[in-house]
Image (cartoon, rainbow, N blue to C red):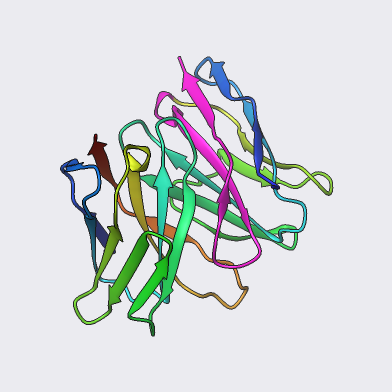
Amino acid sequence: EPEVTQTPSHQVTQMGQEVILRCVPISNHLYFYWYRQILGQKVEFLVSFYNNEISEKSEIFDDQFSVERPDGSNFTLKIRSTKLEDSAMYFCASSTGHEQFFGPGTRLTVL
Amino acid sequence: SQKIEQNSEALNIQEGKTATLTCNYTNYSPAYLQWYRQDPGRGPVFLLLIRENEKEKRKERLKVTFDTTLKQSLFHITASQPADSATYLCALGSLFSGGYNKLIFGAGTRLAVHP
């Protein structure tokens, strides 16, 4: 069964460093999303992406964040200068309709 | 602001019983509501979707109801099994002209099914 994959599974970085989180959505899906989940808290929407552009972004998704679909298969989330509060699980999701398929997540730890 | 509330306490039930989880929301008119399952350290997994004009949906041992007047959804797992132990997330969605659908999640209810 097709699934969303994410790499790396765990990323440790120093505050102020740039990180890129990678996702491979399901191949025939058209809509792509990033969510994050701080430990013990709810899953929060960050950004949605369709037709090579951002459809909507939340207040969390400030100028430090960017997304890109550099080729036909990858979907990336970049955080330019990480802060301690960026530590969280980051989930990529993709869909063709309402049901969203989530990846296993990348645990980002900012020291 | 939009608010989604799920039972904050963990729900402990005996194997074979029916688990009932609640999702209430305010300041929102969702086009549909979804339920997801999340295991520790894993991504959410879609279970069921119910639209605003539907009252009830079933899938195997799962049943969801949706009352837009009460602004509430109930999620039932019948004949529960220890393997059903997980956190269950309620998510609300709206339809946008671009076709995408941002989901707003509740905090989830942790279900523990004991043998």
Residue at 53% x, 40% y is: A91
Q: Quadrant of the C terminus of chain A?
A: top left
Residue A48 x/y as whole percent: 58, 56
Residue at 24% x, 34% y is: B115
Residue B112, picture quadrant: top left
The front one of B88 and A58 is B88
Q: Is residue A60 visible?
A: yes
Residue stretch in magenta: A84-111
Using the image, determine if residue A16 lies above or below residue A80: above
Q: Is residue B86 visible?
A: no
Viewed as shown, does residue B21 lie left or right of A88? left
Residue B8 x/y as whole percent: 18, 46
Residue B53 x/y as whole percent: 39, 85
Residue B9 x/y as whole percent: 15, 42
Using the image, determine if residue A61 lies above or below residue B104: above
Residue at 56% x, 21% y is: A10
Residue A104, picture quadrant: top right
Q: Is residue A87 magenta?
A: yes
Q: Is residue B71 magenta?
A: no
The front one of A75 and B74 is B74
The front one of A80 and B100 is B100
Viewed as shown, does residue A61 lie left or right of B1? right
